[in-house]
C-alpha cells in the first residue's frame, strides 16, 4: 500500500471515529464504599422504530462487584440509566467468566433519553452490518473510552471529567485463534499490541497506545470502500468485550446477537440478516 493510500485511510478513519464517538458513551461507577466516581466502560446508543437502546457488555452494565452504577456523567451531573434490561444469563454457563457472549441491552426510558441527548446522538440500523462474512485483514476501528484517557479536573469545587475517546485502526486477525470460548462464527478478533501502537501528543511527543480497560462495550466498526471506489463506509459489526494481553488480541461479540436480543424482547420487526439465537 503506497504512502498516499495510507494517508487517505488515516483521514477517512479519523473522520469516521469523530462521528462514531458522538454515539458512543462513557460509563462510570462509584468506587465501593466511597463517593469517588471512576470510569468503568463504554456503550453504544441505537435508535430504531422510535425506541432507544444502550448496547454494552453484561459485565459493564450488570456485574459491578459491589460498586454502585453504572452512570452517565455530563458537565458534573450524574444520571442513572433507566429502562428495561436484557442480558445473557451467567448462570446458564455457571458464572460470568464462562459467558463468552457477554451481552446486555437496555431499552431506555424517556428521562434517560432526554439526559443522554444533551451530549450524545443515537445511530440508526443503517450503520449496522449483521451477517458479516469474515475476510482476513479487513480494515476495522475499535472505538471506546479507555479509562487511562479519562482526566479529572477540580475547578471551583466542581469536578470535570473528560475523555476524548480512542479509535484503534487495525485489521481482523487470522482465523486460527485458540482461545477458550472463542467461536469463529460468533466472535471477531483484532490485533492490538500496546507497545507497537503509537501516536503523538499535541507537543509532538510520541506515546504508546492505551490499556484498553474501559473500552468494553464500545464498537468494532468495519471500514469498506463502496464498489472499489474512494468512497468508504463504516458499519458496526461487533461489540468489544475482552482483551487477551498475552496474545495482543481484542475480542468482540458479533452485533447479530445484540440485534437478535432486541428482536426477541423489544421489537420483532428489527431486521437481523445474521445469526439468530436465544441467549437470554
Image: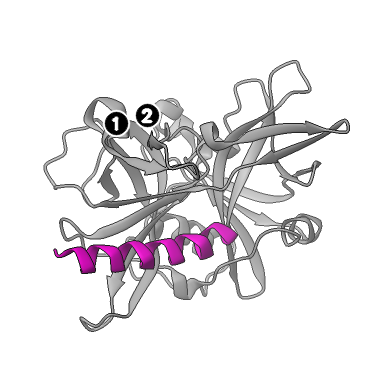
Judging depth in this view, the residue of 261 and 142 nearest the camera is 142
Judging depth in this view, the residue of 82 and 279 nearest the camera is 82
Quarter of the image where one finds residue 64 = top right
Residue that mark 2 sits on:
98
Above or below, comparing residue 168 to residue 229 in the picture: above
> How far across and how far down the image is residue 88, in percent?
48, 42
Residue at coordinates 24% horizontally, 30% vertically from top-left? 180
Quarter of the image where one finds residue 222 = bottom left
Residue 92 in view here: yes
Residue 131 in view here: no
Neighbours of disc 1 within 10 Å: few (<14), some (14-19), many (20+):
few
Q: Which residue is at the far front?
A: 203
Above or below, comparing residue 185 to residue 20 in the picture: above
Q: Main secondary structure of the magenta part?
A: helix
Residue at coordinates 75% horizontally, 57% vertically from top-left? 109
Judging depth in this view, the residue of 280 and 64 nearest the camera is 64
Q: Label 1: state its secondary structure.
A: helix
> How far across and how far down the image is residue 16, in percent?
44, 65
**Which numbered tag is attached to residue 36?**
none
Contact between marks 1 and 2 (CB within 8 A): the answer is no
> Given this view, does label 1 or label 2 mark the residue nearer the observer?
1
> How far across and how far down the image is residue 114, in percent?
79, 61
Residue at coordinates 41% horizontally, 40% vertically from top-left? 241
Boundaries of the magenta span: 1-23
Residue that mark 1 sits on:
195
> How far across and how far down the image is residue 239, in percent?
42, 50
Amino acid at each position: 500500500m503506497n504512502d498516499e493510500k495510507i494517508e487517505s485511510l488515516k483521514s477517512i478513519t479519523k473522520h469516521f471515529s469523530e462521528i462514531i464517538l458522538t454515539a458512543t458513551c462513557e460509563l462510570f461507577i462509584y468506587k465501593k464504599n466511597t463517593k469517588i466516581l471512576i470510569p468503568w466502560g463504554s456503550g453504544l446508543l441505537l435508535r430504531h422504530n422510535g425506541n432507544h437502546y444502550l448496547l454494552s457488555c453484561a459485565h459493564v452494565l450488570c456485574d459491578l462487584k459491589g460498586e454502585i452504577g453504572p452512570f452517565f456523567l455530563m458537565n458534573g451531573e450524574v444520571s442513572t440509566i433507566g429502562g428495561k434490561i436484557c442480558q445473557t444469563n451467567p448462570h446458564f454457563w455457571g458464572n460470568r467468566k464462562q459467558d463468552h457472549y457477554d451481552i446486555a441491552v437496555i431499552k431506555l426510558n424517556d428521562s434517560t433519553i432526554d439526559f443522554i441527548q444533551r451530549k450524545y446522538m443515537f445511530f440508526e440500523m443503517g450503520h449496522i452490518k449483521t451477517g458479516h462474512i469474515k475476510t482476513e485483514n479487513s480494515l476495522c476501528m475499535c472505538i471506546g473510552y479507555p479509562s487511562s484517557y479519562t482526566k479529572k479536573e477540580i475547578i471551583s469545587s466542581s469536578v470535570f471529567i473528560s475523555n476524548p475517546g480512542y479509535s484503534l485502526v487495525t485489521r481482523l486477525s487470522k482465523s486460527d485463534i485458540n482461545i477458550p470460548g472463542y467461536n469463529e462464527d460468533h466472535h471477531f478478533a483484532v490485533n492490538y499490541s500496546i507497545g507497537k501502537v503509537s501516536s503523538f501528543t499535541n507537543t509532538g511527543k510520541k506515546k504508546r497506545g492505551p490499556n484498553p480497560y474501559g473500552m468494553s462495550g464500545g464498537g468494532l466498526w468495519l471500514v469498506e470502500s463502496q464498489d472499489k471506489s474512494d468512497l468508504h463506509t463504516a458499519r458496526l459489526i461487533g461489540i468489544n468485550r475482552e482483551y487477551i494481553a498475552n496474545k495482543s488480541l481484542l475480542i468482540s461479540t458479533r452485533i447479530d446477537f445484540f440485534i437478535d436480543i432486541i428482536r426477541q424482547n423489544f421489537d420483532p420487526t428489527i431486521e437481523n440478516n445474521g445469526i439468530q439465537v436465544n441467549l437470554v
